[in-house]
Amino acid sequence: MKTENIEGLTLFEINLLIQQGAKFVMFPNMMTKFKSSTIYFVRPEEKILKYAVKHFFKNVANCWHTIPFRPLYLSKSLFYLAIGGQNYTHAVLADLKTINPVYNPNLYCLQYV
């Protein structure tokens, strides 16, 4: 899955932000077969509402033609909007730790600082 808002961050910085209250959140698309969407990295000072409202309106626009299931899809979408999405922090961190390259700084340059 695609993860957004982690451009330029190292694994150490991501772990530090998670300790401060950040998390990885996903809002599922109700009309797709796989029910998967983009995973967003929400920083501690950010509001989840700006991501949730976008996916809610996308679900409203996609489920207009399914008249018998419309209340079900809209209620599920409202549920995920209310709880702030599905928390995928542990799963994404496990994936990031497996693909994280080892960082070996040049200690010769650091000894004169």
Image (tube, helix red, strand yellow):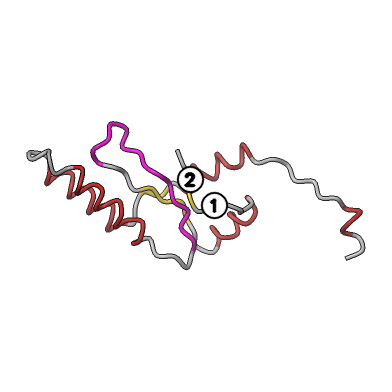
Count of numbered labels shown in the rendering: 2
**Residue type highlighted by circle 2:** Thr
Image quarter of the C terminus: bottom right
| Residue 57 placement, left or right of 38 | left
Q: Dividing the picture into quarters, in which one does residue 19 lie?
A: bottom right
Task: Locate residue 7, reporting x and y percent.
Answer: 56, 51
Residue that sits furthest to the left in the current view: 68
User: Residue 100 versus residue 58: which sits nearer the camera?
Assistant: 58
Q: Main secondary structure of the magenta part?
A: loop
Region of the chain picked out in magenta, as a range: 30-43
- Percent across and percent down for residue 47 are 39, 65
What residue is shown with label 1? 6
Residue 31 image-quadrant placement? top left
Q: CA distance from mark 2 to mark 1?
A: 7 Å
Residue 15's quadrant in the figure?
A: bottom right
Q: Secondary structure at mark 1?
A: loop
Residue 35 lies in magenta, yes or no? Answer: yes
Q: Nearer the viewer, residue 111 or 57?
A: 57
Asked if marks 2 and 1 touch (Cβ < 8 Å), the reply is: yes
Q: Secondary structure at mark 2?
A: strand
Q: Is residue 74 left or right of residue 55?
A: left
Q: Does residue 104 appear left or right of residue 22 in this picture?
A: right
What's the residue type where badge 1 is placed?
A: Ile
The image shows residue 47, relative to residue 71, as above or below, that is below
Place of residue 57 in the rendered image (x, y in percent of width and height, measured from the top left): 24, 53
Residue at label 2?
3
The N terminus: image quadrant: top left
Q: Which mark is residue 17?
A: none
